[in-house]
Image (tube, helix red, strand yellow):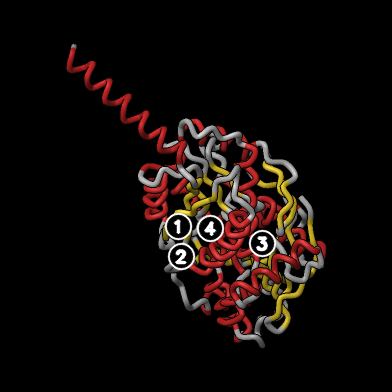
């Protein structure tokens, strides 16, 4: 009995020391779990640049409640398993209040397993697959998982309607990555909306991760003579598909999702082939809104390059988490309790004004916001139109 009493006393002592240390901290630790190397590093690197710019600005203005935001940045190496390991480390060892990222859908779903287990809010700025925030088996919203971007149901619908109504397409071929949650999600939603609107899918061609030669797939598609090609893929495959299609004399419009929004698409396709290409995006640098132009100028001053949509999403995420932290009424008495307070604040986010649009978090923890259509003309991005949810 005495031994048990001693053990309990020690546990209480350790917990009290931890709580005092947590309360006395001069910073608010926020984890960052992004793809900073390997296959899709371009997305994570750009989001980190935007995020750092935002957090630097916030800290220069005094932080949140007098405490600076401290980013604990880890690389998930564009790997699903590593993304879960990183989330576990951030939640358990680093004891962060929230996790920002990953960038991609598959990695976010893996990281969400750890975030849910340890009850720490996780927010992706760009994971668009519908099942990121909603359990596909039960249909229930994942309690600790959020996103600040639009999802594939919206993005797929946008591109299908654009094909039907703006391009007047009656038939479409789809090329997708069978190993990618992002690619399969967009494929499903585009097909559903396009066929419901009277369009016909004349070809569905899947490829394996890492594919470089699409000539045989494209030759099959060419024989079906579709009005448009929809390729819901990431930047490497997008550039190669565009280039190889044009080399085969296929000059019909090529459509994509936000995965097309990277300079590597044009780099791989070549400027002369990067025409008649359209994709959905989170913002356009040609938007004349003063908030957008102010962000672009600050980003160019810091990094000496123009920001793409992923940089803008990262920037918005920094201000989004700061906004939630301000409204969370943090007590710094218990990290578990403060994580719950922060989760509630994120759930209650309404009319958050960002560079990429106004964000409202709905009951499924998705961001209700607008999208834009970008057209590539000789490799240059041109604003085409804006669509609201």
Q: Earlier in the sequence, mark 2 or mark 3?
A: 2
Query: What element does badge 1 sit on?
Result: strand
With 10 as the anchor, is 39 left or right in this view?
right
For mark 4, what is the residue? 103
Q: Which mark is residue 260?
A: none
With 121 as the anchor, is 172 left or right in this view?
right
For mark 3, what is the residue? 201
Q: Is disc 2 in contact with disc 1, using a CB cutoff of under 8 Å? A: yes
* Circle 2 or circle 1, nearest the eye: 1
Q: Position of residue 304 (x, y in %)?
A: 61, 77
Q: Earlier in the sequence, mark 1 or mark 3?
A: 1
Which class describes the residues within 10 Å of circle 2: few (<14), some (14-19), or many (20+)?
Answer: many
Q: Can the viewer see residue 128?
A: yes
**Foreground pick, 19 / 41:** 19
Q: Can the viewer see residue 140?
A: no
Q: Earlier in the sequence, mark 1 or mark 4?
A: 1
Q: Is disc 1 in contact with disc 3, using a CB cutoff of under 8 Å? A: no
For mark 2, what is the residue? 36
Q: Earlier in the sequence, mark 4 or mark 2?
A: 2
Which residue is rendered at x = 60% and y = 63% of the image?
A: 53
> How many numbered markers are drawn?
4
Residue 190 location, quadrant: bottom right
* Circle 1 or circle 4, nearest the eye: 1
Mark-to-mark CA distance, 4 and 2: 10 Å
Which class describes the residues within 10 Å of circle 4: few (<14), some (14-19), or many (20+)?
Answer: many
Which residue is rendered at x = 54% and y = 42% of the image?
A: 145
**Foreground pick, 376 / 77:** 77
For mark 1, what is the residue? 73
Query: Looking at the image, is 240 positioned above or below residue 332?
Result: below
Q: Earlier in the sequence, mark 2 or mark 1?
A: 2
Query: What element does badge 4 sit on?
Result: loop
């Amino acid at each position: 009995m005495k031994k048990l009493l001693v053990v309990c006393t020690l546990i209480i002592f350790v917990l009290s020391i931890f709580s005092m240390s947590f309360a006395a901290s001069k910073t608010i630790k926020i984890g960052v779990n992004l793809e900073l190397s390997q296959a899709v590093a371009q997305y994570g690197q750009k989001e980190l640049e935007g995020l750092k710019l935002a957090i630097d600005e916030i800290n220069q203005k005094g932080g949140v409640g007098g405490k600076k935001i401290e980013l604990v940045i880890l690389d998930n190496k564009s790997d699903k398993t590593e993304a879960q390991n990183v989330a576990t480390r951030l939640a358990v060892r680093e004891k962060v209040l929230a996790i920002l990222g990953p960038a991609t859908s598959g990695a976010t779903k893996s990281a969400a397993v750890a975030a849910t287990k340890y009850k720490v809010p996780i927010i992706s700025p760009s994971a668009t697959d519908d099942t990121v925030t909603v359990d596909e088996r039960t249909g229930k919203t994942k309690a600790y998982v959020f996103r600040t971007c639009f999802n594939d149901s919206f993005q797929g619908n946008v591109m299908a309607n654009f094909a039907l109504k703006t391009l007047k397409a009656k038939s479409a071929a789809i090329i997708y990555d069978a190993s990618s949650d992002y690619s399969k999600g967009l494929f499903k939603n585009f097909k559903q909306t396009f066929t419901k609107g009277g369009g016909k899918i004349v070809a569905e061609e899947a490829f394996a991760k890492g594919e470089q030669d699409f000539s045989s797939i494209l030759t099959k598609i060419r024989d079906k003579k579709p009005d448009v090609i929809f390729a819901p893929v990431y930047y490497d495959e997008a550039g190669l598909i565009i280039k190889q299609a044009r080399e085969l004399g296929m000059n019909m419009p090529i459509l994509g999702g936000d995965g097309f929004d990277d300079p590597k698409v044009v780099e791989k396709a070549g400027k002369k082939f990067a025409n008649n290409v359209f994709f959905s995006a989170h913002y356009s640098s040609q938007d004349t809104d003063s908030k957008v132009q102010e962000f672009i100028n600050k980003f160019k001053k810091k990094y000496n390059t123009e920001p793409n949509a992923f940089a803008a999403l990262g920037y918005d995420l920094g201000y989004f988490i700061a906004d939630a932290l301000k409204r969370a009424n943090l007590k710094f008495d218990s990290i578990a309790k403060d994580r719950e307070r922060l989760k509630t604040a994120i759930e209650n986010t309404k009319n958050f004004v960002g560079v990429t649009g106004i964000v409202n978090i709905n009951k499924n923890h998705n961001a209700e916001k607008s999208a834009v259509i970008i057209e590539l003309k000789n490799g240059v991005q041109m604003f085409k139109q804006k669509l609201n949810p």
